Amino acid sequence: MAQRFYHKASVQTAMVTGAVLSVITIVTILHQRSELNQENKHLRSLSKDQSEEIQRLETLLTPFRTIALDKFTGTDAEVLQQLAERIRTIDASLADAKKTIDSLKEELILKTSDRNLTQDQRQSLIQSLAGISGKVIVKADFADSEANMYANQIKSALAETRLEIVEQPSTGVVSVHEKGICLLVMDVQNLPSHAEAILKAFQQIDIDVKGRMSKSARFPEDAVLIWVCHR
């Protein structure tokens, strides 16, 4: 009896190969369809999220659009652009105002805080006056506790030099309305030898000291009077 064609080995191999290829093709198609479904779900989710975000931004934008339409004229885009420029101008003005306020705050702190001779200033003052001799009186308004405290700091530093600290209970009226520190001499035409050195020593540590001749104070002609005025 003749062998049927599908019993032949080559035919069976071809049939099996075809079946396997068909299965692989079907699995591939199903996998790709699954991926497409997942991708579609992802895209739908993104679209939904974007729609919700657009709606949220629209809600946030509504008050600004209302303000812009009330203040400016033109299309929605034009009035919003004008509003944005106005906000930028206001921001710049606020930044400038903040700088001014910060500067005024620092100035106020300096004006209201107690003066203090720092350790660096003290050491620099002592070193600058090394080898300088002469009589020095350091005083302040007796009613100003802050000025007296500062005067005592200065006197303590000068006491560590060769300068002679003269204790004089009363020098008369020296200053009523002046601010800062005054270095007084009896005669500008006949300055004590140490007057200029003391003035320069204070300037080197950024302490403004005004030098002038005394008209009413009483102290030895060969002495220098350092008077700490009000803050």
Image (spheres, helix red, strand yellow):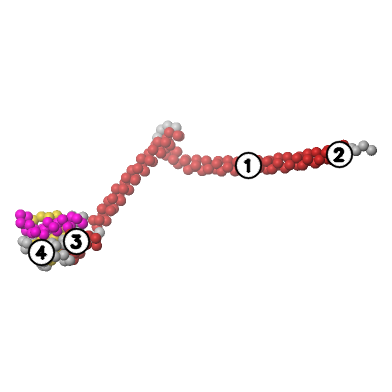
Judge whether 67 appears above or below 157 on screen: above
Secondary structure under tag 3 reads helix
For marks 3 and 4, the one nearer the N-term is: 3
Q: From mark 3 to mark 4, how far is it between C-alphas?
A: 18 Å
Q: Is residue 43 visible?
A: yes
- Residue behind mark 4: 135
For marks 2 and 1, the one nearer the N-term is: 2
Crowding at label 4, few (<14), some or many (≥20) Cα neighbours within 10 Å?
Answer: some
Identity of the amino acid at label 1? Glu
Q: From mark 4 to mark 2, how far is it between C-alphas?
A: 133 Å
Secondary structure under tag 4 reads strand
Q: From mark 4 to mark 1, how far is it between C-alphas?
A: 95 Å
Q: Nearer the viewer, residue 198 or 83?
A: 198
- Residue behind mark 1: 39
Judge whether 75 appears above or below 61 on screen: above
- Residue behind mark 3: 127
Secondary structure under tag 2 reads loop
Crowding at label 2, few (<14), some or many (≥20) Cα neighbours within 10 Å?
Answer: few
Coordinates of residue 5 in the picture (x, y in percent): 87, 37
Quadrant in which the C terminus appears: bottom left
Magenta segment range? 182-205
Coordinates of residue 92 in the picture (x, y in percent): 35, 43
Q: From mark 2 to mark 1, how far is it between C-alphas?
A: 46 Å
In this view, the mark in front (4 or 2):
2
For marks 4 and 1, the one nearer the N-term is: 1
In this view, the mark in front (3 or 4):
3
For marks 3 and 2, the one nearer the N-term is: 2
In this view, the mark in front (3 or 1):
3
Identity of the amino acid at label 4? Lys
For marks 3 and 1, the one nearer the N-term is: 1
